[in-house]
Image (tube, rainbow, N blue to C red):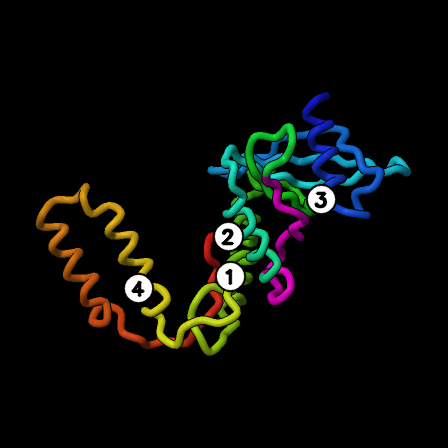
Amino acid sequence: GHEDAAATAMVRRHLGHLGEGLTVTRQRKLYGGSINRVYEWMVRDAAGKEKPLVAKVNNLRSAKLFRREMASLEVYRTQTELPVPRPLAYLEDEPGFDGSGLLMQRIEGVNLSEAKVSPAGMRVLQRDLAGHVVALHTHHRSTYGTALEPSGTRRWLDSFGPIIGEEFFRVRDALGTSTREVIDDIVRNLEDWLPEQSTPTLVHGDM
């Protein structure tokens, strides 16, 4: 239908020579996300062979968050052992599509919401996932900041202090007077509350 045609146009436009002759034949909603909508796009090539891709989309016109997610996935994929899908393209200002999105590889497997996993199997799965997160924390560098920045700051507070202050002041006017006074004091004295004491370490962010 119309949706398959729009998806086909996006796949061909963004996958370059890999997209030549590809056609999206059907779409299936995937579950598990809480903010974006996620779909499996079944794609058929010129030889008739089918393979799935994943499209993660929302109604925002800007793909800023998807561009950042794409870059983060590339860091995890190329610099760590964390098993993440290969990001293929972000979608923005697409004809016939009112929103933005991220197109990525479909990793073989079953969505956890659809899987039948025993309590013992779930414990094994959770241990495996925890092991991957712990492994991320073995990656270090000499400066603080996001993994997407080529450089960073020598002090943790120089990178994250302004973010903490911004988060506080975003809700400041909705708080009572005494609470605002406490928060103001904390933000002015972050050095006392959060002394420098660790090594810059890659953490999981919002996986």
Q: Amino acid at mark 1?
A: Val
Stretch in magenta? 76-92
Q: Amino acid at mark 3?
A: His
Question: Which numbered disc flags the more N-terminal residue, 3 or 2?
Answer: 3
Q: Quadrant of the N terminus?
A: top right
Question: Which numbered disc flags the more N-terminal residue, 2 or 1?
Answer: 1
Q: Amino acid at mark 2?
A: Met
Q: Which residue is mark 2?
A: 207
Q: Of circles 3 and 2, which is in front?
A: 3
Q: Residues within 10 Å of mark 2 (few under 14, many from 20)?
A: few
Q: Residue 131: give x, y in percent of width and height.
A: 53, 62
Q: Residues within 10 Å of mark 1 (few under 14, many from 20)?
A: some
Query: Is residue 116 something one can see in this rendering?
Result: no
Report the number of numbered marks: 4
Q: Residues within 10 Å of mark 3 (few under 14, many from 20)?
A: some
Q: Of circles 2 and 4, which is in front?
A: 4
Q: Could you tell me how far apart the alpha carbons at marks 3 and 2 are, in whole angstroms?
A: 25 Å
The answer to which image quadrant residue 187 occupies is: bottom left
**Is label 2 in contact with label 4 (beta carbons under 8 Å)?**
no
Q: Which residue is mark 3?
A: 14
| Secondary structure found at label 1 | helix
